[in-house]
Image (cartoon, rainbow, N blue to C red):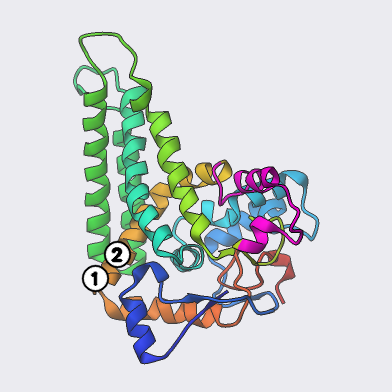
Amino acid sequence: MLEASHDTKESQALGRAPWLGGAVLTTPKPAPPRRTFSETREESFWRGFCPDLFAPTETPPLTARIIQHVTVAPMAFVTFLNLHYQLYLIHLLHTTPQGWLGHMICVPTNVALLFYGLAVFAPFSSTALPGANAGVLLLLVLCVWYAGMAAKLRNTLWGVLACAGVASLFVAGNALARFAIDPSTSAPIHWTLHPLFLMVVVSAIQACSHLFEPMVPPRANRSKRWMTMREFVWGDSEGLPVWKRVVKLMWTPIGTLWGTFDEWYSSAKLFPMFLLQAMWALGYKPEQRRQFREQIFDVVQQGNPALDWVGSGGGAFVRDLQ
């Protein structure tokens, strides 16, 4: 699990290493399911709307089990203004320099490629708006979303920089589209510049950065408990064939198959979150950063951090809460 240190020197060292999120990974300690922060309206809506997935019993339906395995924390994919929960998961699932560097590079690249794909495949036909495409609509949606998150956190500069940043990625994506498409011919885009190919490559790299994590979260390892990477890859048996290990990695969200989809889908959400982390690491609003870190410390020190809420419980379901 993640265990916080309140030692002054260590805390200062962790502050200089933003990829650690201010916490250290150790072996999980048993802890019963317990929520630290109250359920938000978003969480309550989704648990009432689709209880089989977001508030399942001990034996959820097959479809729900598959989605839980693929997404690891399905609630994170549908709650867009649940900032405590989102920041909690970022600290929980990205604890190495490789993971942070991979996401800091690949997340904005993926968002730019999304705009690139929309410029290629969804251009507007109106001659009054030459070069306009569906990316304009996406840009507006993302700016409203990011501004809403910033307003909830009362962090104006973060909202301004997030909107400016995504607008820059929109410009970069459209510039790449103009470079890749030759208007004088009807020749298709070369496969090395195809938006889908580039998205898959970048998302796969982003997903594989999780392979450096020392712990594999519940559900990703097909269990309800945290597991060391060595235990997950090698298993209890030393005679586990290599091909089975490879298949296991490919079939999990920390590998190249489902992980690629997860990272592609999450990039637009992760972009402002990692931007905020970078701003905090550079000294912006130290009190705000300290507040969130201490709140997360209080949670993870209890042992067995939960995935579906801020608190303990590992891969337990909400109906297991006491």
The answer to whether marks 2 and 1 mark residues whose Cβ atoms lie closer than 8 Å is: yes
> Which image quadrant is residue 32 in?
bottom right
Q: Is residue 148 visible?
A: no
- Quarter placement of the N terminus: bottom right
On the rendered structure, is 216 left or right of 118? right
Q: Quadrant of residue 137?
A: top left
Going by the numbered disc 1, the residue's amino acid type is Leu
Q: Is residue 238 magenta?
A: yes
Residue denoted by label 1: 282
Taking the spot 74% from the left edge, 69% from the top edge, the residue there is: 320
In the picture of the structure, the residue carrying the numbered disc 2 is 278
Query: Magenta stretch containing residue 32, yes or no?
Result: no
Disc 2 versus disc 1: distance between alpha carbons?
Answer: 6 Å
- Answer with left or right where residue 320 lies relative to residue 124: right
Residue at the image position 41 percent from the left and 71 percent from the top: 21
Instruction: Name the side, left or right, on which 249 lies relative to 16.
Output: right
| Magenta extent | 230-256
Q: Position of residue 164 (x, y in %)?
A: 21, 50
